[in-house]
Image (cartoon, helix red, strand yellow):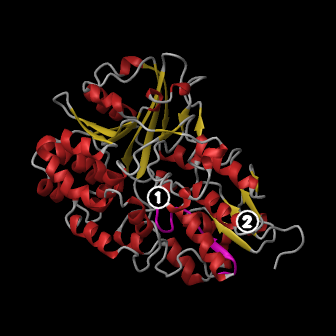
């Protein structure tokens, strides 16, 4: 029991999972306080003028297919708190060396038609899941349990028995479709020969149409601002510039929720957790890091394929073989000469992010965890390959190697933006194998970061599930 004036729950960390836990608890009538080490809430979901005055850049994440039609985000009225979304007509494009691009539109039928010879393959791969996004995410974005839609999950499993490198050749007749699938598979941050790579690719493909890949108007900070605004209407308190280094930095309360990585939790709790649990947390494996570059541009990126201007998101990497090679090298601890690059050009659709006539863009590639290699030149060379003259438009840039990413968001250990490696073991048991992976073996302590199910992505489901587990047991 807490004393007078003390909150029922304290949430340490104000990323989307921490805020989701706080919202879920507050809606259940609990008094909640959120503690954030930085001067503003939101964790990796934030924006700043990283290059030049007047240019708004998303510091980490930028595109949010999972922040719309998932169980937590469906339940929060963020539009009433200033959040609006911009939906490009295409979810993403994948430029090729011949000057064309594979385009995946939010309209599924249009995509199938545009794929030409690969249209039938794309329809076979994704068709059974159209209109079932909510059912699919309801099962996949949950802790380990009996599925509510076993037939649907079986259909997904049958389609993803092969890794991307084999599935691409089995499904698509041309290198264009194969390259497109490889780009989607790279979101797994796994080698494309890994068994789980196709499951990630298929989920990303379905999300392109249900509901699409939007960007928040005004930048990523708009998502966090809306969540905080709604949370405060529920009576919760968000305290910034409050770093928690030890449990003594947290006032007495009924429950503590850590929106932190296992490594951070170990530092804060010390020997207050059982030795066996500490040992299991210490074995938690972090995945590759990210190297990110932001640009202020004097004009839009001059893609050879004009279709690339129909979307905010570009997958830059060439053929399936090239992408597979790049992602494999990262897992082997090497830096690819031609990395696969995720590029976002939000100001094409949200012009307020840059001065009139100017633009913003960012891109990142995967690198070995903790890498100190400057990948700026290699990233820009890849974009220049498909957009000649790109470098001539750069009027400001800001590079974020893994150490800077971790400095900004301490959850990103070694630059790992996914909260841990997406290995089979850690997808089934994250951070430890348990029917309640959120509850720690100490009274009233819970872990609710992306290091718990269902893992990385801006969906809030880790915090949502952790809070519901607590409420169910209290």
State the image coordinates of residue 471 (x, y, percent, origin top left).
66, 76
Does dot 2 land on a helix, a strand or a loop?
Answer: strand
Q: Residue at x 16, y 29 (%)?
A: 98
Q: Please say whether residue 361 is visible from this viewpoint.
A: yes
Q: Quadrant of the C terminus?
A: bottom right
The span shown in magenta is 442-456
Q: Height in image: 319 above or below 381?
A: below
Question: Does the magenta portion include 446?
Answer: yes
State the image coordinates of residue 191 (x, y, percent, origin top left).
27, 57
Left or right side of 249 for 395: left
Identify the residue position indicated by label 1 in the image. 456
Name the dominant secondary structure of the magenta segment: loop
State the image coordinates of residue 272 (x, y, percent, origin top left).
68, 78
Identify the residue position indicated by label 2 in the image. 10
How dense is the environment of label 1, judged by Cα within 10 Å: few (below 14), some, or many (20 and up)?
many
Quarter holding residue 27: bottom right
Cα–Cα span, label 1 and label 2: 22 Å
Q: Which mark is residue 67?
A: none
């Amino acid at each position: 029991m807490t004393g007078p004036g003390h909150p029922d729950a304290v949430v340490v960390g104000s990323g989307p999972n921490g805020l989701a836990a706080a919202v879920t608890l507050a809606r259940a009538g609990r008094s909640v306080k959120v503690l954030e080490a930085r001067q503003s809430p939101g964790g990796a979901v934030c924006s700043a003028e990283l290059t030049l005055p007047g240019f708004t850049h998303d510091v980490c994440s930028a595109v949010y297919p999972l922040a719309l039609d998932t169980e937590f985000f469906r339940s929060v009225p963020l539009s009433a708190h200033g959040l609006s979304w911009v939906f490009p007509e295409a979810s993403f494009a994948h430029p090729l060396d011949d000057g064309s691009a594979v385009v995946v539109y939010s309209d599924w039928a249009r995509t199938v038609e545009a794929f030409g010879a690969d249209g039938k393959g794309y329809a076979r791969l994704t068709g059974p899941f159209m209109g079932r996004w909510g059912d699919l995410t309801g099962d996949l974005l949950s802790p380990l349990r009996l599925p509510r839609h076993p037939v649907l999950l079986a259909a997904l499993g049958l389609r993803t028995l092969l890794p991307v490198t084999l599935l691409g050749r089995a499904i698509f007749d041309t290198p264009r479709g194969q390259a497109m699938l490889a780009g989607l598979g790279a979101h797994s941050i796994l080698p494309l020969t890994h068994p789980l790579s196709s499951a990630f690719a298929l989920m990303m493909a379905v999300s392109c149409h249900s509901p699409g890949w939007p960007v928040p108007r005004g930048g990523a900070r708009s998502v966090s601002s809306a969540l905080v605004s709604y949370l405060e209407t529920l009576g919760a308190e968000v305290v910034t510039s409050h770093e928690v280094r030890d449990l003594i930095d947290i006032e007495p309360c009924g429950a503590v929720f850590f929106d932190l990585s296992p490594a951070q939790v170990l530092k804060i709790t010390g020997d207050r957790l059982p030795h066996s649990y500490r040992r299991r947390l210490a074995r938690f494996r972090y995945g590759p890091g990210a190297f990110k570059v932001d640009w202020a541009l004097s004009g839009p990126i001059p893609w050879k394929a004009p279709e690339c201007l129909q979307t905010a998101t570009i997958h830059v990497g060439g053929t399936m073989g090239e992408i597979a090679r790049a992602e494999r090298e990262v897992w082997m601890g090497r830096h690819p000469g031609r990395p696969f690059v995720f590029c976002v050009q939000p100001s094409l659709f949200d012009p307020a992010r840059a001065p009139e006539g100017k633009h913003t863009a960012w891109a990142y590639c995967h690198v070995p965890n903790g890498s100190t290699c400057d990948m700026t030149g290699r990233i820009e060379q890849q974009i220049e390959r498909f957009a000649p003259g790109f470098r001539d438009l750069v009027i400001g840039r800001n590079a974020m190697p893994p150490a800077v990413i971790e400095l900004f968001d301490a959850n990103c250990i070694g630059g790992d933006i996914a909260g841990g490696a997406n290995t089979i073991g850690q997808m089934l048991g994250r951070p430890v194998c348990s029917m309640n992976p959120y509850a720690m073996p100490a009274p009233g302590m819970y872990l609710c970061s992306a290091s718990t199910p269902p893992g990385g992505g801006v969906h809030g489901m880790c915090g949502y599930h952790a809070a519901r587990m607590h409420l169910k047991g209290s």
